[in-house]
Amino acid sequence: MNVDDLDTPALLIDLDRVERNIRRMQEYCDAHGLALRPHIKTHKIPALAHRQVRAGARGITCQKIGEAEVMAAAGLTDILITFNLLGPAKMERLARLAREIDVKVTADAPEVVEGLAAMARGAGVRLPVLVECDTGFARCGVQTPQQAVALARRIAAEDSLRFAGLMTYPTQPSSGPWLRQARDLLVESGLAPRTISGGGSVSAWTTHDYPEITELRTGNYIYYDRTNVGLGAATFEDCAQHVLATVVSRPTPTRGILDAGSKSLTTDILRAEAGPGHGRIVEYPEATIYALSEEHGHVDFSACARPPAIGERVHIIANHACTVSNLFDVAHAHRGGRVEAIWPIAARGMVR
Amino acid sequence: MNVDDLDTPALLIDLDRVERNIRRMQEYCDAHGLALRPHIKTHKIPALAHRQVRAGARGITCQKIGEAEVMAAAGLTDILITFNLLGPAKMERLARLAREIDVKVTADAPEVVEGLAAMARGAGVRLPVLVECDTGFARCGVQTPQQAVALARRIAAEDSLRFAGLMTYPTQPSSGPWLRQARDLLVESGLAPRTISGGGSVSAWTTHDYPEITELRTGNYIYYDRTNVGLGAATFEDCAQHVLATVVSRPTPTRGILDAGSKSLTTDILRAEAGPGHGRIVEYPEATIYALSEEHGHVDFSACARPPAIGERVHIIANHACTVSNLFDVAHAHRGGRVEAIWPIAARGMVR
């Protein structure tokens, strides 16, 4: 089967590029003594998580417990869930996971730590917990290094928990001094952090500039996308995820309509650096996907020397690869256009 | 089971509101002699499509053939697919549908009509085809009433097709004169259109101002959403879809983080009239969901007298109900909080 045989829209994964991207990031981490813990949110496919681990990754990162359940069921054994987990339903699921595999979680508040401790006590496990630190992004996380130490003490005081280090997202210039101070305070307190985990795709290649950081969590590098190319993290030739679409209407000489809309590409406009519009059409790089309906991509082909005919198929590099993966049930993995695998996107939709 | 027992995020459907919304729109159409053909993209749930038909709808509207397959398999028998269908894979699927149920499609170009005619000839069916008209929205559609007539002739000339009328989206002020002229030209040509189908949620209640239009396609009215409330089409008390979420982090006195991000709410900003941010928190209407990560909703609670504690659960009315339905695998239908049905969102992800 060739990608030319697939009906559209379809989600294509270029295996040669995936393998190169995995290798490069692992080589970077190895060269700098960093543990790599890929975030699987970009692909949500167990077969790719296994490739990342086989290439040398320490384990994987998940954001939701449902993603971790899928990956554990597929044989992944070292999973960090970077999310405050709360409530009886999630505690029951976490207990099952913790008995089965090496699962670690994060927390940014005593209420979260209390719930984790009670769960681990009941389950008869000792759960590693990292303190989530807000080092400048202003999302979750304790606000100061002093608060990080206080929460680390709170974790260490629980027999059923183990203080496992610090976590931040994303790694950015303000993260260095913040984490250094927190680390030094922790060492003074006899709570030297085993792991200091930084993350993000934009700063991934500069993680070695932050000597405090021992582990890199990054996801997007396996596929890259138009935003990461715009930000200089990759080239279009590195992009391994394409949405295959068909030009279904050519109502005017310059307008074209694709059968891929926001249900295939998402409306995500991550960063202005991606450039105008909702994706890059590989065959028509001068075209602009200027609007999206749910099932229609609205394209301005006026800058193209030869606009496409009705029925022509195109490859689109979306602005945001991770959320595109969340929209499709299967991905077609190919090498030079020849389909080698049809992978269920098994962790798609796992918001719980 | 009560919604209080559900883990979050979860997609809730308020059945009392759904039934009221269905009844009101059907009453409006009945009062004005309009056929109602609800667009199922808003809910993607066969049980709700059946309720719409039982209430008096003529049939349903789907955007993709995969949606129509799901609905036909669930017993819906009159389906309009408002999309240019192209290529052998879709023609094979359309042939199966056309042998099984009353399926109609649209077309805006001779290339599309040719493919449909060949398919119908081979399948031994006579397929009704409406001409899609661009009456001002600038998406798909023939550009002038004269082109509509030419394409209608092209359809009528095929033994395997039947010219079934005109379709436009959305109905807007420019649609009236456009459709009137097209209708008059068609009548002169002996091709009087049986159906003139208008659509859209914002203009739904004013469809009777367009006497040319005989059929209303609208979807959002079954749930409504924050955008439609902002546009004056409904009130928050009409909104029947809620994303149930938990406040998982309270890193600062004014910031709160929800466990529902863009994978639960979408980043869709349909219209500025929705108001700032990514949804309305029913319990905290003064709060602003000012940013979304994939799994985090970033909320500013500074305008609220009493911000929530970690672990508190909230109901969110999203900006765009249709794409939210596309993100969840199941919906929990409740009456006053008591869960009456757990419905698979069976037509979710049907982009082909």
Image (cartoon, coloured by chain):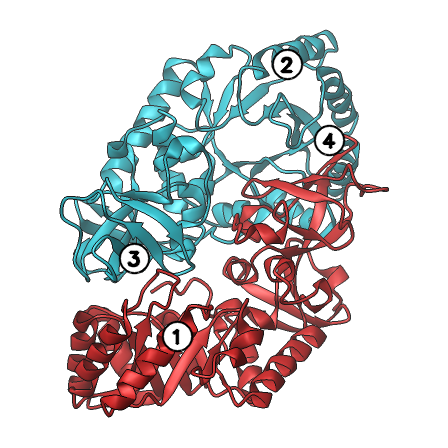
Chain colours: A cyan, B red
Please state which of the two labelled residues, at mark 3 or mark 2, is closer to the viewer: 3
Determine whether label 4 and label 1 are within 8 Å by CB.
no
Q: Earlier in the sequence, mark 3 or mark 2?
A: 2
Q: Residues within 10 Å of mark 2 (few under 14, many from 20)?
A: some
Q: Quadrant of the C terminus of chain B?
A: bottom left
- Residue at left 62%, top 14%? A179
* Amino acid type of the residue tagged 4 in the rendering: Pro
In this rendering, position of residue A19 left or right of residue B76:
left
Chain of the residue that carries numbered disc 4 in the rendered image: B
Based on the displayed image, in which of its 4 quarters is residue B117 positioned?
bottom left
Residue A52 visible? The answer is no
Q: Find disc 4 in the rendering and name its residue.
A: B251
* Amino acid type of the residue tagged 3 in the rendering: Leu
User: Relative to A162, is B35 above or below?
Assistant: below
Label 3 – label 1 distance at C-alpha: 28 Å
* Amino acid type of the residue tagged 1 in the rendering: Pro
Label 2 – label 1 distance at C-alpha: 65 Å
* Amino acid type of the residue tagged 2 in the rendering: Trp
Q: Find disc 3 in the rendering and name its residue.
A: A258
Labels 3 and 2 within one chain? yes
Q: Find disc 2 in the rendering and name its residue.
A: A178
User: Relative to A215, is A68 above or below?
Assistant: below
- Residue at left 29%, top 36%? A239
Please state which of the two labelled residues, at mark 3 or mark 1, is closer to the viewer: 1
| x and y percentages locating residue A22 in the rendered image | 33, 31
Secondary structure beneath label 3 = strand
Determine whether label 3 and label 2 are within 8 Å by CB.
no
User: Relative to A159, is B307 above or below?
Assistant: below
Q: Find disc 1 in the rendering and name its residue.
A: B177
Labels 3 and 4 within one chain? no
